[in-house]
Image: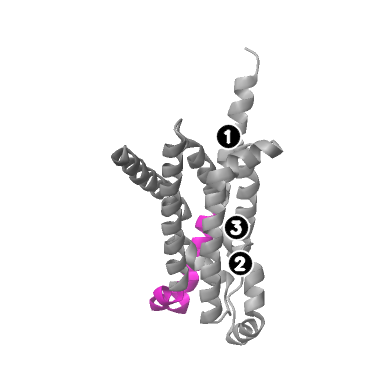
Amino acid sequence: MTIDLLLALGKSFLFVLAAMLPILNPAATAPVFLSLTEGASPLTRTLLARRIAINAFWLMAGSMLVGSYVLDLFGISLPIVRIGGGLILAAMAWRLLGATPSMPDSRAALAESFTPEHARRQAFYPLTFPISCGPGSVAVAITVGVALHEASLVTSLVRMAGALVAVALVALLMFLAFRYAARLLHALGDAGTAVFLRLSAFILLCMGVQIVWDGASELVRTLWSSLPR
């Protein structure tokens, strides 16, 4: 029995890690984090990276554990979550694409205005949701949470424990990627970093459009299947 539970723990850990890490992709989101926190001090960015990682962990864990029940309570379907969240993500990415590069004097002004209190206010929206942990991630977490349920209560609890460990690992990787993003991009220089930031924003825009498309397609398929033949 113990071996079966350990296998269930390991399988759920690998399953959730394989499902969540590619869609969260902290390495790809790190340049966007840098762009949105331009002017912040290294200490403030470290504080933000820690808060974002903690917020992402609780958002993913909550989505897995109770997300499906919350949606049922309010009568909201997963396609609607995808469409609404995808629109927010696309709007944020569009704003990043249209942002003008900051000059040295404007960077100094940003550094003075980007206080730790300002950082705390932005830690959840938009830096955690929808930038770091978007609607696609939430939808996947809810779906994964449903798949982790078993007939046996003990097995279900063990599988949920493995899932939470996997989410904690992803949150740790997110913290490390954001914490050292500036150091990793320093080798690119200002011009290379600007190009990389624009490319990341464009990919984020495409992700938002893709999420909206997936949600709309699922709604259309549901409507089509409900039509009388």
Q: Position of residue 54 (x, y in %)?
A: 53, 63
Range of magenta residues: 182-205
How many discs appear? 3
Q: Quadrant of residue 98?
A: bottom right
- Determine the image quadrant of residue 76: top right
Q: Is residue 133 visible?
A: no
Verify CB contact (< 8 Å) between mark 3 and mark 2. Answer: no
Answer above or below: position of 27 versus 77: below
Report whether 28 appears left or right of 205. Answer: left
Given residues 146 and 207, the one toward you in this image is: 146
Q: CA distance from mark 3 to mark 2?
A: 9 Å
Task: Specify the farthest residue to the top.
Answer: 229
Which SS class for mark 1?
A: helix
Looking at the image, which residue is at 67% across and 81% down? 113
Neighbourhood count class around disc 3 (C-alpha, 10 Å): few under 14, some 14–19, many 20 upward:
many
The residue to which callout 1 is attached is 217
Q: SS of the residue at dot 3?
A: helix
Q: Quadrant of residue 222?
A: top right
* Disc 2 target residue: 123
Residue pointed to by mark 3: 129
Q: Alpha-carbon neighbours of circle 1 within 10 Å: few (<14), some, or many (≥20)? A: few
Q: CA distance from mark 1 to mark 3?
A: 23 Å
